[in-house]
């Protein structure tokens, strides 16, 4: 007999450490598209997408078919030992799709954190410099290097030090709460220009290998830089021979209406990391970069036993086909337009919404108790998540202050599912708005 939610929670508490947190008490039995069904038979509208993993939807038929067909051939050989075509095909396609005209090369790994680790390794190897700069509010993973690069202390870093050396942090382009006191919404991009000053007081440019930036900060609250930001940062990097790493792990694979979010800013990074929705739920990540950079590390210096697993590569190739041949990118753009309109209307109605930000359907609401002081409404954000869950909608909070609600629904969500989810969200939002 299949156990229910309560029984499974008891077993989870007994056998799984509490450090592996749960964001909802529902144990899922099946999922399709934008609907998850728990073991008690309750349907949940998914606005979380496995934290940005299910852009093509749960169990997309083409992804499932690709995995099944590959599993019947072989599951694992280790690409280093006995290589296979799927790895090469996927690398070729990512190289062709990556921003910019420079020749590219791609290596495959298992997770977003592993992609970031390898991007840092490559940058240090090529530049022969130790320093790495990341941003406040940034999130890059939970391994030693990526935890070091991650900004938020609790829960990600607390008690897990000491951290990796030669890691430095600068303010992010958080225009709503400009770290330099600029006027919102246009602050003159002071945070980008200040990078040059940073080299005087914190780490010399000549000792800096790379700066790593999420185009839109995921866990950090969907902080979205102004249009001129990346051009300024890239110019400073080029002047000093610093590599620009763009972390597309949450923002990539169609989440913003473009395959890569950085395409909204029109620049060509030196290195790009992708994961999450890359393989439709299968564990896979990629590091794509200019060939003159990627080709430098010596044989054996990069890789891993499971990196570019055949099943994951097959799934990723199917995902790219869905985006490029089945019109999912166009669907993403239209979804973003619908969401932006709805959220703009909600912001007019509910004082608790301080800012709506993001690009395409990668949007978030920053909740505040007072629009003038911008006092964060963290407790209300937490309550909003709970209210929505009780009504059958799964959403996620985020942000350094815990007061941001982010939307990561599958891009294949139907109009009916979207409307039902938005109705639940607005009904719950009205309730928490009445408390401020």
Image (tube, rainbow, N blue to C red):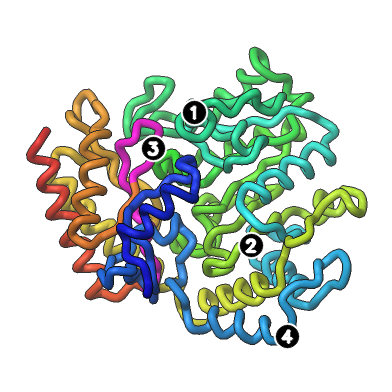
Dominant secondary structure (helix, strand or loop) of the stretch shown in magenta: loop
Q: Is residue 223 above or below residue 369?
A: below
Q: Between marks 4 and 3, how big is the CA–CA gap? A: 44 Å
Region rendered in magenta: 397-412
Left or right of 206? Residue 320 is left
Q: Which label lies toward us, 3 or 2?
A: 2
Q: Identify the disc placed on residue 153.
A: 1
Where does label 3 land, which residue?
A: 399
Q: Identify the disc placed on residue 73.
A: 4
Q: Earlier in the sequence, mark 1 or mark 3?
A: 1
Where does label 2 land, which residue?
A: 284
Q: Between marks 1 and 2, how big is the CA–CA gap? A: 26 Å
Q: Between marks 4 and 1, how big is the CA–CA gap? A: 45 Å
Are the residues tagged 1 and 2 within 8 Å (C-beta)?
Answer: no
Identify the element where label 2 is drawn.
loop
Quadrant that contains the C terminus = top left
Of residues 157 and 95, the one nearer the viewer is 157
Q: Between marks 1 and 3, how big is the CA–CA gap? A: 12 Å
């Amino acid at each position: 007999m299949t156990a229910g939610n309560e029984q499974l929670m008891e077993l989870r508490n007994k056998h799984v450490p509490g450090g592996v947190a749960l964001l909802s008490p529902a144990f899922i039995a099946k999922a399709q598209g934008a609907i998850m069904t728990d073991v008690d038979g309750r349907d949940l509208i998914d606005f979380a997408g496995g934290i940005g993993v299910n852009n093509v939807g749960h169990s997309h038929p083409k992804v499932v078919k690709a995995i099944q067909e590959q599993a019947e051939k072989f599951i694992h050989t280790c690409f280093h030992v006995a290589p296979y075509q799927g790895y090469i095909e996927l690398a070729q396609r990512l190289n062709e799709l990556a921003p910019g005209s420079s020749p590219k090369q791609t290596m495959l790994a298992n997770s977003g954190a592993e992609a970031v680790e390898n991007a840092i390794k490559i940058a240090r190897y090529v530049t022969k410099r130790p320093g790495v700069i990341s941003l406040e509010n940034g999130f890059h993973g939970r391994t030693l290097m990526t935890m070091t690069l991650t900004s938020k202390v609790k829960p990600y870093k607390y008690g897990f030090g000491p951290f990796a050396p030669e890691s430095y942090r600068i303010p992010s382009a958080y225009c709503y709460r400009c770290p330099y006191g600029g006027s919102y919404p246009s602050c003159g991009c002071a945070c980008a220009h200040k990078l040059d000053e940073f080299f005087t007081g914190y780490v010399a440019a000549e000792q800096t290998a790379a700066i790593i930036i999420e185009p839109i900060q995921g866990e950090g609250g969907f902080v979205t830089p102004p249009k001129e930001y990346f051009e300024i940062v890239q110019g400073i990097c080029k002047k000093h021979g610093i590599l620009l790493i763009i972390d597309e792990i949450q923002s990539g694979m169609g989440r913003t209406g473009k395959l890569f979010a950085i395409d909204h800013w029109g620049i060509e990074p030196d290195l790009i990391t992708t994961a999450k929705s890359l393989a439709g739920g299968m564990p896979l990540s990629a590091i794509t970069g200019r060939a003159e950079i990627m080709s430098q590390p010596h044989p054996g210096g990069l890789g891993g036993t499971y990196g570019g697993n055949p099943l994951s590569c097959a799934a990723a190739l199917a995902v790219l086909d869905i985006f490029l041949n089945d019109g999912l990118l166009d669907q993403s753009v239209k979804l973003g337009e619908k969401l932006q309109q709805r959220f703009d209307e909600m912001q007019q109605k509910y004082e608790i919404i301080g800012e709506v930000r993001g690009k395409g359907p990668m949007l978030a609401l920053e909740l505040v108790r007072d629009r003038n002081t911008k006092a964060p409404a963290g407790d209300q954000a937490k309550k909003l998540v709970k209210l929505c869950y009780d009504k059958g909608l799964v959403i996620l909070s985020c942000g350094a202050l815990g007061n941001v609600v982010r939307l990561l629904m599958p891009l294949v969500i139907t109009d009916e599912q979207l409307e039902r989810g938005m109705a639940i969200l607005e009904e719950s939002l009205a309730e928490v708005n009445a408390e401020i």
